[in-house]
Image (cartoon, grey):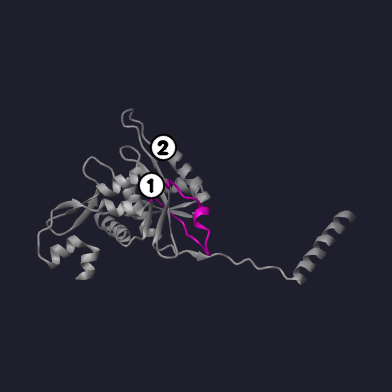
């Protein structure tokens, strides 16, 4: 019971105390997001992450949209102590007033630059327009792996996210849209006991969704030890010196 109370207070009240829980409630307390935010850090670099004895495995995640919502892309990694860190966030927003939609070719090309910069081989994504986006990604040398964003799968991803927040095992970038979208999420309970988590009607959760997806994937991306640089022995250095001199002599002879 104590574990249930810690992981899902609403479920504890509903199932263990047999008390009514409101059908709509705020999902993530603002103080948890504030505590997790890396103050004044708008974006991280690889050099900021690779100062220790391990190399992070970076994870890319995106939530595509072209007409009404923003297209969101973010990069994450996991620290040796299990803390998930958000490194990069990019969003592209269509112009509704001018009825200008987003161009997927331009966006995928920009994501490809980040993929190369952060040494990513694949990016996790919602299933929306998946096949077309996968073809574009292949042209730029990376792979997109689709994930179903169903009510059940989103609830599971958001469950992992809020657990990271409650245990102080996540670091978020100090970008207003991150705080705004995470704190406005609502948890809705239907009559059958099902749960859905989304933004209020008329608002957006593209950044919140990409954070939930990226964190879920990053929890499996364990950092690896840095390769050990072996120092050459005097004997090996001597052999290398002989080889260089031999190569110089051969060139002179030719």
Q: Identify the residue under disc 2.
A: 103
Pick whichever of labels 2 and 1 is earlier in the sequence: 2
Q: Position of residue 155 (x, y in %)?
A: 26, 57
The residue at 13%/68% (across/down) is 16
Occupied quadrant, residue 239: bottom right
The furthest residue to the left: 19
- Element class at badge 2: loop
| Residue 242 vs residue 10, the one in the foreground | 10
Occupied quadrant, residue 249: bottom right
- Residue 22 is covered by the magenta coloring: no
Q: Position of residue 111 (x, y in %)?
A: 46, 45
- Residue 51 is covered by the magenta coloring: yes
Considering only vertical position in the picture, is 40 above or below 253?
Answer: above
The residue at 14%/53% (across/down) is 23
**What span is in magenta?**
38-62
> What distance separates the C-alpha of mark 2 from that of mark 1?
27 Å
Quadrant occupied by the N terminus: bottom left
| Mark 1 nearby-residue class (10 Å; few <14, some 14–19, many ≥20) | some
Quadrant occupied by the C terminus: bottom right
Q: Position of residue 13 (x, y in %)?
A: 14, 63
Decide if residue 254 is in sight here: no
The answer to whether the residues at label 2 and label 1 have Cβ atoms under 8 Å apart is no
| Mark 2 nearby-residue class (10 Å; few <14, some 14–19, many ≥20) | few
The furthest residue to the top: 98
Q: Identify the residue under disc 1.
A: 174
Decide if residue 231 is in sight here: yes
- Element class at badge 1: loop
The residue at 46%/54% (across/down) is 122
Along the horizontal axis of the image, is 27 left or right of 127?
Answer: left
Number of the front mark, 2 or 1: 1
């Amino acid at each position: 019971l104590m574990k249930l109370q810690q992981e899902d207070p609403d479920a504890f009240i509903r199932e263990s105390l047999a008390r009514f829980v409101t059908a709509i409630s705020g999902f993530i307390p603002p103080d948890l997001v504030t505590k997790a935010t890396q103050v004044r850090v708008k974006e991280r670099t690889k050099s900021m992450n690779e100062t220790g004895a391990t190399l992070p495995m970076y994870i890319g995640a995106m939530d595509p949209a072209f007409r009404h919502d923003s297209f969101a892309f973010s990069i994450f990694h996991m620290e040796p102590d299990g803390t998930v860190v958000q490194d990069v966030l990019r969003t592209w927003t269509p112009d509704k007033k001018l009825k200008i939609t987003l161009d997927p070719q331009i966006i995928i090309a920009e994501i490809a630059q980040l993929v190369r910069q952060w040494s990513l081989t694949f990016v996790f994504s919602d299933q929306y327009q998946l096949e077309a986006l996968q073809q574009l990604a292949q042209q730029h040398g990376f792979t997109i792996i689709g994930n179903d964003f169903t009510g059940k799968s989103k609830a599971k991803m958001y469950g992992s996210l809020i657990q990271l927040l409650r245990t102080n095992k996540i670091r978020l970038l100090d970008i207003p849209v991150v705080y705004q979208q995470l704190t406005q999420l609502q948890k809705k309970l239907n009559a059958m006991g099902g749960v859905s988590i989304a933004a209020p009607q008329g608002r957006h959760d593209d950044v919140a969704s990409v954070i939930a997806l990226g964190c879920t994937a990053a929890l499996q991306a364990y950092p690896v030890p840095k390769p050990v640089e072996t120092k050459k022995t005097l004997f090996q250095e001597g052999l290398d010196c002989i080889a260089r001199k031999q190569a110089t002599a051969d060139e002179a002879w030719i």
